[in-house]
Amino acid sequence: MSLSPIVIFAYNRPSLLKQTIDALQKNYLADLSDLIIYADGSKNSNDLNSVNEVRTYLKTITGFKSVKIIERERNYGLSVSIIDGVTSIVNTYGRIIVLEDDLITSPYYLKFINDALNMYEKDEEVISVQGYVYPSKINLPEYFFIKGADCQGWATWKRGWDLFEADGNKLLNELRQKNLIKDFNFDNNYSYFKMLEGQAKGIINSWAIRWYASAYLKNKFTLYPGKSLIFNTGFSNDGTNTNNEYLSNNFNSKINLEKIGLERIPIENSILGRKAFINFFIGLNLWKNPKALLKHIFIKLFKRKNAIS
């Protein structure tokens, strides 16, 4: 089996990073894998101690075929660091597994990701493999495809990352011209387009929304597991783009600890997978809007009463 290098992007959260490394060390194939860690530089003097603590810890890591540490001399920020690092690694190795410093992996995460990278390496329609999936009340297939790309515990090949478009305005214009905004937003249940507008205006600094849009507009697909192989510990006040306990309670679910026996499936949008995503987004919107939630409950009860009577 050809194994991809694992790349972790870290900054100033030593305790979360240690959890990420501990889980990764327990992975099947970890001792046969090359680990590369990008350690970002401090933004200011307030971050210097925690940044140095991270760098000191990195030098103690074992349990992998090799460990390479790349210490940034200045602060790149997460978005620039990931774009620069992923580009460099895929140009060198041809493929990459990407983790951030707040992701706990299943013991069979590396197995699933590497199996998929090998299986779909020559399939141009497949742009990436994903380790995380939203919690779902729908009984999903063991794995499935969704159009686009994602950002938690993901992997790709050089041919996939070469399609990344850094210019958010180009992506916005193409979505408008092709009248794809509703579909891009999962039937207008999650405001991805608004996020992309925010990125283009400089309000938010997200590489992930551009990765999703780049893949979506090229009609490429990402392979997801039916049960998440990733648990995010970073939904807290020290996260770069997440600072709400609400996200932790709603986005995380029990991690899958079982091995996935991967076989080829048709490369197409999963009807059940897309439905599960849409239902998840609807649930998020309802919990943020109590009036809408009450209305939703009332309508469901009314329909159930009519069905019984």
Image: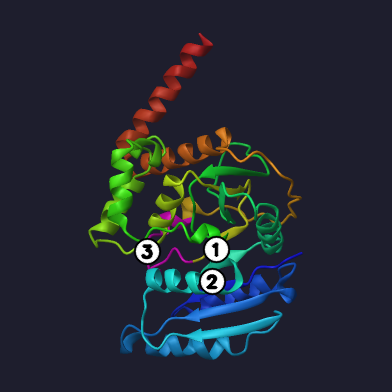
Q: Amino acid at mark 1?
A: Lys
Check residue 91 in the rendering and tell me which mark sits there, or answer none.
2
Which residue is the site of mark 3?
A: 243
Q: Is residue 65 visible?
A: yes
Q: Is residue 76 left or right of residue 215?
A: left
Q: Quadrant of residue 283?
A: top left
The residue carrying pointer 2 sits among few (fewer than 14), some (14 to 19) or many (20 or more) residues within 10 Å by Cα, namely some
Instruction: Give, as a single range, the part of the protein colored magenta.
Output: 234-248
First in residue order: circle 1 vs circle 2: 2
Q: Going 48% across and 77% down the picture, which residue do you hit?
A: 10
Three-letter amino acid code of the residue under disc 3: Asn
Considering only order in the chain, which callout, 3 or 1, is on the residue closer to the N terminus? Answer: 1
Which comes before the other along the chain, label 2 or label 3?
A: 2
Few, some or many C-alpha atoms within 10 Å of disc 3 (few <14, some 14-19, many ≥20)?
some
Residue beneath label 1, please? 158
Q: Is residue 103 above or below residue 176?
A: below
Magenta run includes residue 240: yes
